[in-house]
Image (cartoon, rainbow, N blue to C red):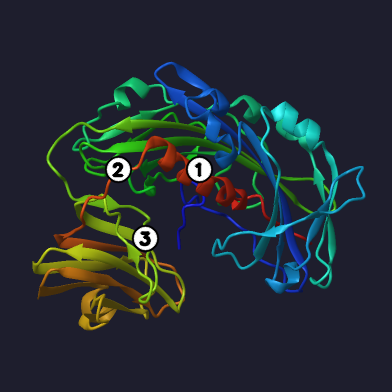
């Protein structure tokens, strides 16, 4: 399920754990941050909210990660830097739906990439996990020169049509235009696009990531956002991310990744309310459903993926009363799979509607409807399959939610970027120890 510890919930490509116990992988991730407004792009600390540098990681930040097969195998994990005999403690990372458990060392913020790599030079970084079994110690050969001397070091994500984004018409498609870039290295996974570019959008009132584009190749120079993806008359934040990952040489693969981010804000033009589609908006459990963003007065549809059994995706929403109807559709499901679509009274736990979705009965498509009094409800899917199909829940009578008080710029950014700083470290620089 998604969280807000990045701007976004970023797609991770993670190597499978080896059959034996012990340390499964090691990696290093370097992040650079920038800010864009009408005056251009500057390092994050030089922007109007640079005082919040500690929340986002300053202009440059580095994270070292070790992964173990089980959580308890990471107990007491440490990392020792080149030329030092003092081990640094690693702290538990976040749940990224990986088969491994991650333990991170996040360095303090730095004013530039050069300052960061002076403090953390290339060399042998030794990871130790005493409880992991064999192996309990692994060395990551950090190639600082690869990062410092690569074209990625100076690849600054920039919207070339920033002015056109301001006051955009949410009811029409909008094309984000940006520069292409060059990354470094190549992937050990031939199906992975490395390097890649990505665009994300955040609702500033809710701190929810409301859109995240697919990964695009580094030669991409534009991405078109569909009409009615956003709401009219709403304040948003955006980011453009350039990322590159490689597996360097050594006794085993050492994952090296660099991600450069440029952040900015924009507002959509005023207009009639349009039901919004929440893309890749994962739900929660029946007991703890994910609330639809409360700033959204109407939600047209929700999309996501539902993992291998047992898995659930449930959402909580406010209904003002009247006839309610919603349709669930699954794509890419195995022909023998079965899913359950449920509508529940959140306050009482009463199941109002239940529908089995399978290929034989309804081709994985079905509608639940009922006359509902005003109140709080939840709706969602239960997976009975081992595959990971995509789903869409379309509200034929749009789900409703009240509008909260708006957050100040400092509050939304502090919360959003505090979330961002930790989650990105899990991205793709995780490679199996052989």
Which residue is disc 2 drawn over?
Answer: 406
* Residue 92: % across, % down: 66, 61
The Cα atoms of the two marked residues, 2 and 3, are separated by 27 Å
Residue carrying label 1: 417
The answer to which image quadrant residue 433 occupies is: bottom right
Q: Earlier in the sequence, mark 2 or mark 3?
A: 3
The residue positioned farthest toward the bottom in the image shown: 350
- Residue 318 position in % (x across, y down): 21, 63
Q: Residues within 10 Å of mark 3 (few under 14, many from 20)?
A: some
Label 1 vs 3, first from the N-terminus: 3
Secondary element type, mark 2: loop
* Crowd rating for badge 2 (residues with CA inside 10 Å; few <14, some 14–19, many 20+): few
Above or below 64: residue 58 = above
**Which residue shows up at 41% across the image and 21% down it?**
160
**Seen in the image, is 138 located left or right of residue 167?**
right
- Res. 240 in view: yes
Q: Nearer the viewer, mark 2 or mark 1?
A: 2
Looking at this rendering, what residue extends furthest in the top direction? Answer: 39
Question: Where does the image place residue 321, in percent across and percent down from the top left?
Answer: 9, 67
Residue nearest the observer in this picture, 10 or 346: 346
Label 1: how many Cα within 10 Å (few below 14, some 14–19, many 20+): many
Instruction: State how far apart marks 1 and 3 are (Cα).
Output: 23 Å
Q: Which mark is residue 129?
A: none
Q: Position of residue 198 (x, y in %)?
A: 46, 40
* Image point (80%, 31%), residue name: 118
Instruction: Tell me if 87 is positioned left or right of 209 in this view.
Output: right
Q: CA distance from mark 2 to mark 1?
A: 17 Å
Give the residue number, with chain letter if any, for mark 3. 304
In this picture, residue 390 sits left or right of residue 95: left
Task: Out of 309 and 263, give the one closest to the viewer.
Answer: 263
């Amino acid at each position: 399920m998604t969280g807000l510890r990045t701007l976004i919930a970023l797609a991770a490509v993670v190597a499978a754990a080896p059959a034996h116990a012990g340390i499964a992988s090691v990696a290093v991730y370097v992040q650079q941050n920038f800010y864009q407004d009408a005056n251009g792009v500057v390092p994050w600390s030089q922007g109007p909210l640079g005082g919040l540098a500690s929340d986002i990681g300053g202009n440059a930040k580095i994270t070292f990660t070790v992964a173990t097969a089980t959580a308890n195998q990471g107990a007491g994990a440490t990392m020792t830097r080149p030329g030092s005999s003092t081990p640094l403690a690693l702290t538990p990372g976040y749940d990224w739906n990986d088969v491994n458990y991650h333990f991170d060392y996040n360095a303090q913020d730095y004013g530039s990439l050069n300052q960061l790599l002076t403090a953390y030079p290339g060399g042998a970084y030794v990871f130790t996990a005493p409880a992991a079994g064999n192996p309990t110690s692994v060395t990551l050969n950090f190639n600082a020169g690869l990062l410092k001397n690569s074209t990625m070091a100076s690849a600054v994500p920039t919207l070339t049509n920033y002015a056109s984004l301001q006051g955009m018409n949410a009811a029409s498609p909008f094309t984000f235009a940006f520069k292409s870039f060059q990354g470094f290295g190549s992937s050990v996974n031939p199906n992975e696009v490395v390097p890649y570019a990505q665009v994300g959008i955040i609702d500033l009132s809710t701190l929810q990531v409301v859109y995240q584009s697919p990964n695009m190749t580094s030669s991409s120079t534009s991405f078109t956002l569909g009409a009615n993806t956003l709401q009219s008359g709403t304040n948003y934040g955006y980011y453009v991310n350039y990322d590159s990952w490689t597996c360097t040489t050594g006794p085993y693969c050492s994952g090296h990744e660099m991600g450069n981010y440029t952040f900015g804000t924009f507002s959509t033009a005023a207009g009639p309310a349009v039901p919004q589609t929440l893309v890749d908006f994962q739900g929660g459990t029946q007991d703890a459903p994910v609330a639809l963003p409360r700033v959204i007065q109407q939600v047209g549809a929700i999309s996501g993926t539902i993992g291998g059994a047992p898995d659930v995706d449930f959402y909580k929403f406010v209904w003002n009363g009247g006839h309610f109807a919603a349709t669930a559709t699954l794509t890419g499901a195995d022909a023998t799979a079965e899913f359950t679509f449920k509508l529940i009274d959140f306050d009482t736990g009463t199941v109002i509607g239940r529908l089995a979705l399978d290929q034989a009965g309804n081709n994985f498509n079905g509608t639940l409807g009922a006359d509902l009094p005003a109140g709080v409800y939840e709706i969602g899917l239960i997976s009975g399959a081992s595959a990971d199909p995509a789903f869409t829940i379309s509200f034929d009578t749009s789900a409703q939610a009240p509008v909260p008080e708006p957050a100040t710029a400092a509050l939304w950014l502090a919360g959003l970027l505090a979330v961002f700083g930790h989650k990105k470290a899990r991205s793709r620089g995780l490679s199996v120890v052989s």
